[in-house]
Image: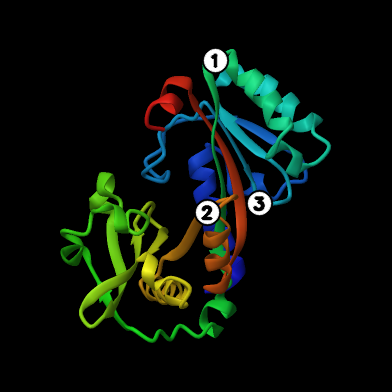
């Protein structure tokens, strides 16, 4: 698989998530689309979106409630740059628009895609034993220590993992969830006393390779402020792919967004 194919797969998935076409992310102009539920969307998304902004760097594709779209279109088209739409102070303007519909910005995330050459160039060696793990091995691991690698609310999507062991003790775990038909998302955890030893990047890289072996595209998500996670993505052979800003109802943000 080449990088251009990986990008095509990602854009097609974003098209399912945003009720548009993959070509919309390549156009020079921005676009807005009414959001609809889709069986092909990432399984953890709660669709339809109130408002969701996505950029692969060329433009902004927005989707959301039909009655919001005219104001959202005006907002993204009036920004001085793509980047400004995804940061303050412009996000305060977006929140003012969303407030009319009882919503505000909730999630801001950067998504990483594998650079195929880098993934296979990175030294994935680890000074600790690494084991391939499957769903049967995850029983009993749905605890806070492994909450990035595994998701208790969506156990049925946790399909593959790589564990690092120190004399039989699990000290690090990278897991992936089958969030959509073509792409599996990687999350990783390392016990605090074993961090800064290259374990996270070794696990993430090894899992990415295993995902490719299963004809899926691995992807990785990090909050912009999570410097450690972003560094791990880069060390593991991943590169920035796209960014998203997602709005949620006020009640969901106050509760358990």
| The C terminus sits in image quarter | top left
- Residue 182, relative to residue 62: is it above or below? below
Determine the residue located farthest toward the right in the rendered image: 80
Q: Residue at x 50, y 85 (%)?
A: 123
Kindly report the distance in space between the C-alpha atoms of the residues bearing marks 3 and 2. 15 Å
For disc 3, the neighbor class at 10 Å (few under 14, some 14 to 19, many from 20) is: many
Look at mark 1 in the image and give the residue it sits on.
101
- Residue 254, placed above or below residue 188: above
Instruction: Residue 219 in the image: state x and y as whole percent.
Output: 48, 60
Residue 220 pos. (x, y %): 49, 59
Q: Which quadrant of the structure image shows residue 33? A: top right
Q: Which residue is mark 2?
A: 222
* Percent of width and height locating residue 158: 28, 57
Foreground tag (1 vs 3): 1
Q: Nearer the viewer, residue 66 or 102?
A: 102
**Picture coordinates of residue 129, whole percent (x, y):** 30, 84
Q: Residues within 10 Å of mark 1 (few under 14, many from 20)?
A: some
Which image quadrant is residue 136 in?
bottom left
The residue positioned 42% from the left and 20% from the top of the image is 251
> Which mark lies nearer to you, 3 or 2?
2
Disc 1/disc 3 C-alpha distance (Å): 27 Å
Question: For this view, does 100 lie left or right of residue 168?
Answer: right
Q: As drawn, which residue projects farthest toward the front?
A: 193
User: Pointer 3: what residue?
Assistant: 56
Q: Residues within 10 Å of mark 2 (few under 14, many from 20)?
A: many
């Amino acid at each position: 698989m080449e990088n251009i194919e990986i990008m095509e797969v990602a854009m097609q998935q974003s098209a399912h998530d945003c009720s548009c076409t993959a070509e919309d992310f390549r156009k020079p102009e921005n676009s807005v689309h009414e959001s609809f539920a889709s069986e092909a969307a990432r399984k953890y998304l709660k669709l339809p979106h109130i408002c969701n902004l996505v950029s692969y760097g060329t433009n902004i594709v927005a989707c959301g409630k039909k009655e919001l779209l005219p104001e959202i279109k005006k907002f993204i088209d009036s920004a001085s740059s793509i980047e400004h739409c995804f940061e303050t102070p412009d996000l305060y303007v977006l929140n003012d628009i969303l407030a009319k519909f009882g919503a505000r910005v909730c999630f801001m995330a950067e998504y990483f895609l594998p650079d195929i050459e880098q993934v296979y160039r990175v030294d994935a060696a680890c000074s600790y034993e690494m084991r391939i793990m499957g769903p049967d091995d995850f029983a009993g691991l749905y605890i806070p220590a492994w909450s990035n690698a595994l998701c208790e609310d969506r156990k049925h999507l946790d399909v593959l993992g790589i564990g690092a062991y120190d004399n039989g003790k699990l000290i690090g775990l990278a897991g992936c969830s089958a969030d959509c038909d073509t792409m599996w998302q990687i999350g990783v955890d390392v016990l605090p006393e074993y961090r800064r030893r290259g374990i996270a990047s070794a696990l993430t890289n090894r899992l990415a390779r295993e995902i490719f072996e299963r004809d899926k595209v691995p992807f990785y998500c990090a909050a912009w402020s999570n410097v450690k996670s972003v560094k791990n993505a880069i060390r593991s052979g991943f590169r920035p792919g796209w960014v998203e800003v997602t709005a949620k109802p006020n009640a969901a943000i106050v509760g358990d967004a």
